[in-house]
Amino acid sequence: MKEERLMPPQVMTLTACGILGIDILIVQRDMVDVAGQDAWISLILGGMTAMILGSVCYYLAHLYPEMDLPQILLHIFGDFFGRIILLPFIVYDVLYLGMSLRIFAQALKMFLLSATPMLPIVVLILLAAGYAVCKGVFAIGGIMDIIFPLCAVTILGILLMPMNQIHLSNLKPILYKNTGNVVKGILTGYQQFTGYGTIAYFYCYTQKTKGTFKWYLAGLGIPIFLYIALTLITIMVFGPTDIGYLTYPTLTLAKSIEIPGTFLERAESFAAILWINIVFVSVALLLFRTKRNFLELLHMKTKHQNYVIWGIALLLIGIALFIRSGTEAISFFSKIKKSSRIFGLLIFPFITAMGYIKKRRETRA
Amino acid sequence: MVKLLKRRLEKKDRKKDKKFGIKGDTDHLKPFRLSEIVEDNITRLKNSMNNTFDIKSREFQIGGTKYQAAILYIADLVNEEMIMSHLLKPLILQSTAVIDSDTEVNFQSVKDSMLSIGSVQEAETFDEIVLAVMSGDTFLCIQGYAKGLIVNTRELNGKPFAVPTVEPSVKGPQEAFVETLKINLGLIRKRIRDPNLMLEEYKIGRRSKSESVLVYIKGIADPDIVEDLRKRLSSVDLDMGQSAFQIGTLVTDRPDSIFPQVQITERPDKLVVSLSEGRVAVLTDGSPNAILVPVTLPILMQSPDDYCESWLVSSLIRISRYVGLFLSSLFPAIYIAITAYNPGMLPTRLVLSIASTRTGVPFSAFIEALLMEAVLELLQEASIRLPKAVGQTVSIVGGLVIGQSAVQAGIVSPIMVIVISVTAVTSFAIPDYSLGLASRILRVPFMILATTLGSFGIAIGMLLLLTYLSSLKNFGIRYLSPITPYRFQDWKDTVIRAPFKDLKKRPEFLNPEDTERSHSRKKEKEIS
């Protein structure tokens, strides 16, 4: 039988699903907090930064086409330093994942399951994601292929439905005495798209063709466009001041949609179901990354991966339910993201530069 | 060195064939002509038809003289009695009278005086002979002549066949396989006159020694899949190999899956189309069904009628089938989730109407649905087991009388009767019976998830199901192919069915050797 490989279009869906995540609910508030009504401009610039860094990351994966990120790190920096560099990745992924699960459970309680405790929600989503990771990279690719278009179409629906409620005046004044904040917002904007690094974990399983990079760029571009559009529409509907008071602006936007006379009158429940899918793909991808990182960090064999997956799942349940207050959880989530900004911005160019030097040396030798 | 060169040339030829897709027709046999040696002709002809087990030859002496002759035919297609009484008998026994009357035995005298069959034609090149033999004629050649005779021995009245009962079609052919392997192979041969149609015989069952035949088209089917199936068939260890399904279950990767891992068909037309796409079939003597592998979910959602309507109509029907599959598994669960957890999603009037119909019903929506589901399953099972006429009565009594009485007695609400009825109707839209069964099995777990966790439970159930389906593999092919991984070329015949002029390529996901179904004009020019 021929060796199975991910098809180039799957690079697009995996990358896009790696970017779409829990942030889709709160991206508008995060951005408006920094850049006010010009948040969408910061997001465009942040998106462009992510595209550039994503291309760097792709180049790194391309340099070592048969290795994933933890293997590349150990190859470039050696066993000891490689593991040291791997550690921040693990800490960030585990904390980000744990808090994502917490915020997910909180929002779900608010919109769909008011009487259900958070524990079964977190356990069930982890069970589904863990099962997907156990089934391997090609099963994950298949799931993303189906979920991604559904998510994209639903988000487009959420964007188009409230068109009758938008007020262009909410965007004004554009860039008036706000340039500094817009520049500051670039970093926050870029932070929303750090999922571009997913390629470094999946490239080694991909069929390498000329078009793969184009599919990767499409995978970066689509979520960037959706986030920008979502921010723009939310600002136009609610205005920058009101967004600051909304816990989950996207769900509130969906809640504002009413289709009178049709079979289903409110769209927020659909948005919440869509969001379950988005969180699932995001959790599955992060869990896969964390599993790979742990396997390499602890020098474990692949046959033991299921123990690692369920071990990480237990750890994540603990992290998700550790903080009692919902507001504290959201602020802790923001802190995790803020603290990793500079690291995230510099780490891939650094690894790629080192990888390039190492590769040249190897070629010469 | 010679071997290496030969292999290189073979590889080059294969590439050329792949490029132009000419393997299937007999045109490439045009340059080959008969020789004067009977043995040589028969061997070469058999080889050009890939020497399948149903190609029969018989060498003999005409009238007991030194004149050697031979006949060649395909057993599944000819009327063997006609060959015996009008070809072999006159040539071997009755020809002695002709020879005694001092007539010289030569090609012309055999043609004019010894054959008592209506249509006899002379032939010299392999292409016409192979095509004739593939069509059910018998080829006769005589020592010393570089030409032969094509004798019409086709089964004119046709062989007995059944009418499809499990896979009926509105406009498609009304032929189905029967329990006799020879007739079934004839039904396939009748539709594919390709010398590359391969038939490999296996004896399965330690005691029953049932004949099973592996069928595929060489040059189209992926050799890896064929080889894999060959190995699996050879390793089947059974006491009694009785049905195609039994053998199918033993050759699959996941026999415990509720989703069909082999496609069972009773339709020769469906089997032939599948073979032309690069799939492989197994037929078993005594079984009126054939199994087809590899199988994927989108393949199971296709019906022969899709190719008997305009592309737009067929596409809409196919989409409705997918909706049917979705509703068949999820409709009761969605109803439970919305009414129990998210009634706000529905219009207020509808919520009030549902609430009023449920007044006085002692059970929760879940128990109600479960009761109705159990009754529905029992009714379906009963109507299959009973004779047709009684079965219909059971359906009427069950569907109308029990349903109406249950509502009047206040055991179930009218809306629940509607939900379960719609679910039952949608499940009948699924063209594959086994897939329909799988969707029925899935209903209950989804209902449990809906009653415990509402739409979140359904979403989790769907994600688990999706993960399971994405991880399923069938002879190396993903079960959700070609929906995922994305193969845009193959999407032309998946959820929709594109116009025939656009279906020029075989499904890529089946890794066919010859990818083209028909040539573009440019390629035709290149070939000519």
Image (cartoon, coloured by chain):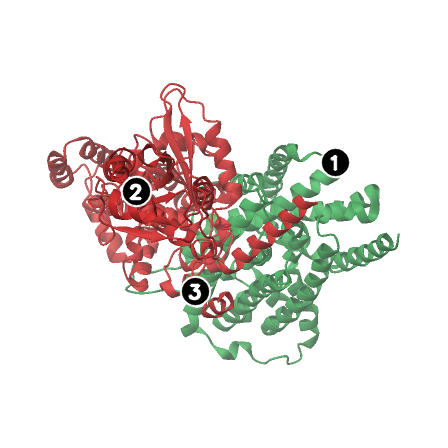
Q: Which residue is labeled 3 in the image?
A: A157
Q: Secondary structure at mark 3?
A: helix
Q: Chain of mark 3?
A: A
Q: Chain of mark 2?
A: B
How far apart are the two marked residues, 1 and 3, measured between alpha carbons? 46 Å
Single out the mark in the foreground, 1 or 2.
Answer: 2
Residue sitting at x 70%, y 45%? B1
Residue at the limit of the structure toward the front, as seen here = B102
Q: Looking at the colours in the rendered structure, which chain would you say is drawn in red?
A: B
Task: Confirm whether residue B357 shows in the render.
Answer: yes
Single out the mark in the foreground, 3 or 2.
Answer: 2
Among numbered discs 1 and 3, the one appearing first in the sequence: 3
Point out residue A88 in the picture as x, y percentages from the top left corner.
74, 48
The vertical placement of A227 against A64, above or below, is below
Q: Quadrant of residue A310?
A: top right
- What shade does chain A have? green
Q: Quadrant of the N terminus of chain A?
A: top right
Q: Which residue is labeled 1 in the image?
A: A299
Q: Which mark is residue B77?
A: 2
Residue sitting at x 46%, y 34%? B254
Q: Secondary structure at mark 2?
A: loop
